[in-house]
Amino acid sequence: METQKFYTLPPLPYGYGDLAPAISEEQLRLHHDKHHNAYVVGANGILERMDAARKNGTDLDMKATLKELSFHIGGHILHSLFWKNLAPAGKGGGGTPTGALADACMAEFGSFERFKKEFSAAAVSAEGSGWAALTLCKKTGRPIIMQIEKHNTNVYPNFAILMVLDVWEHAYYLDYKNDRGKFVENFWQIVNWDKVSKRLEKTVYR
Ligand code: MN
């Protein structure tokens, strides 16, 4: 198998207009084609600089390089997950989780409504630019909500990420101005629970 040495921008698994009105076509196009792509280009650029420095025997500023690399790779991976855990409302998007995911949420949060409330509060209160993530601790099997700062701060090593919500301003500003709360509320209409469940099952039962 050919090894892929650089990152590529994955195409969206739906059309640019398909998540409207929760996310408009213009907003989604900008977010995917410009913002997500910038992290792909950014990560690849740093990898190329590292390759060149190693080849030429020149020094790298390891602190700055690794900080920047982690930011861009984190951005790329989180956005790739984000597109996959969304689907058009009523066509795979929205509703409530079923199966193992519903059971895990019930055991941890007591009800889906309680989970939704906690996850929404995590997303709305994430400081500055960041994400809310539903993760799974592989040691305890407990679903744990994370608040990720930027793309890479506060991430728990070795936890499986099941679902993410991007709450950077670039994710919603065209549609919602500064009303992050409204964006988070509408996010629930486009969650692809089937994909989130599959990620849980893969993590737990592999
Ligand atoms: Mn984003």
Image: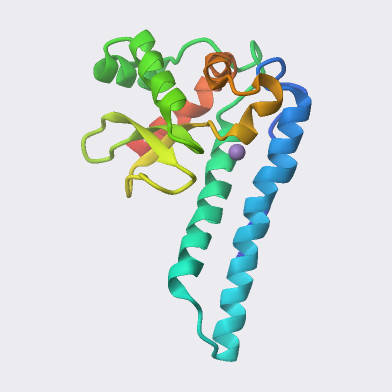
Which quadrant of the render holds ligand 1?
A: top right
Residue 194, relative to residue 1: is it above or below?
above
- Viewer-nearest residue: 138 or 37: 37
Snapshot quadrant of residue 145: top left
Q: Position of residue 91 (x, y in %)?
A: 66, 14
Residue at (62% x, 32% y) in the render? 171
Picture quarter with the N terminus: bottom right
Q: Where is residue 75 in the image (x, y as percent from the top left)?
A: 55, 47
Task: Please give the count of numbered marks on the rendered protein.
Answer: 0
Q: Position of residue 61 (x, y in %)?
A: 48, 76
176 displayed left or right of 24: left
- Viewer-nearest residue: 130 or 85: 130
18 displayed left or right of 76: right
Residue 182, relative to residue 80: is it above or below?
above
138 displayed left or right of 180: left
- Viewer-nearest residue: 80 or 97: 80
Q: How is the image coloured?
A: rainbow
Q: Where is residue 26 in the image (x, y as percent from the top left)?
A: 78, 28
Picture quarter with the C terminus: top left
Residue at (22% x, 40% y) in the render? 139
Snapshot quadrant of residue 2: bottom right
Residue at (53% x, 14% y) in the render? 185
Residue at the limit of the structure toward the left, as seen here: 140
Q: Can residue 2 be seen in this view?
A: no
Q: Can residue 204 be seen in this view?
A: yes
Residue at the limit of the structure toward the bottom, as seen here: 57
